Image (cartoon, rainbow, N blue to C red):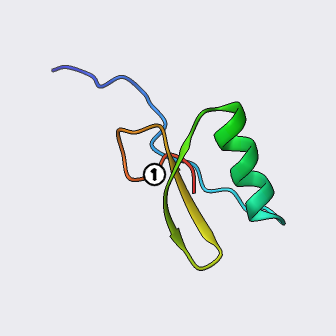
């Protein structure tokens, strides 16, 4: 029986200023905005719909 390597699927963050958080995560971690839905932003490293929401 093989074991899968532990990993982090995605992270949901509650922030006061979404635009400021998006700027931070795109600038510092090179994430890309993949989708927006009202006040929500979905950011990705590229392999999944979102890694940070």
Name the residue rendered at 42%, 27% in the picture.
Answer: 6
Looking at the picture, how far across and down is residue 23, in whole percent? Answer: 73, 48
Q: Relative to 5, is 52 on the left or the right?
A: right
Name the residue rendered at 59%, 80% in the picture.
Answer: 38
Looking at the picture, how far across and down is residue 37, in whole percent? Answer: 53, 75
Is the residue 44 above or below the residue 5 in the image?
A: below
Name the residue rendered at 68%, 56% in the picture.
Answer: 13
- Which corner quadrant of the image does residue 24 belong to? top right
Looking at the picture, how far across and down is residue 7, in whole percent? Answer: 44, 31
Q: Mark 1 points at which residue?
A: 50
Tell me the quarter of the image containing the C terminus: bottom right
Q: Relative to 2, is 24 on the left or the right?
A: right
* Total numbered circles: 1
Looking at the picture, how far across and down is residue 15, in whole percent? Answer: 78, 61
Residue closest to the far right: 16
In the image, 8 versus 3, the foreground residue is 8
């Amino acid at each position: 029986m093989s074991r899968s390597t532990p990993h982090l699927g995605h992270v949901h963050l509650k922030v006061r200023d979404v635009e400021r958080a998006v700027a931070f995560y795109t600038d510092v971690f090179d994430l890309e905005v993949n989708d927006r839905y009202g006040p929500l932003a979905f950011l990705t490293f590229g392999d999944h719909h979102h890694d940070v929401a």
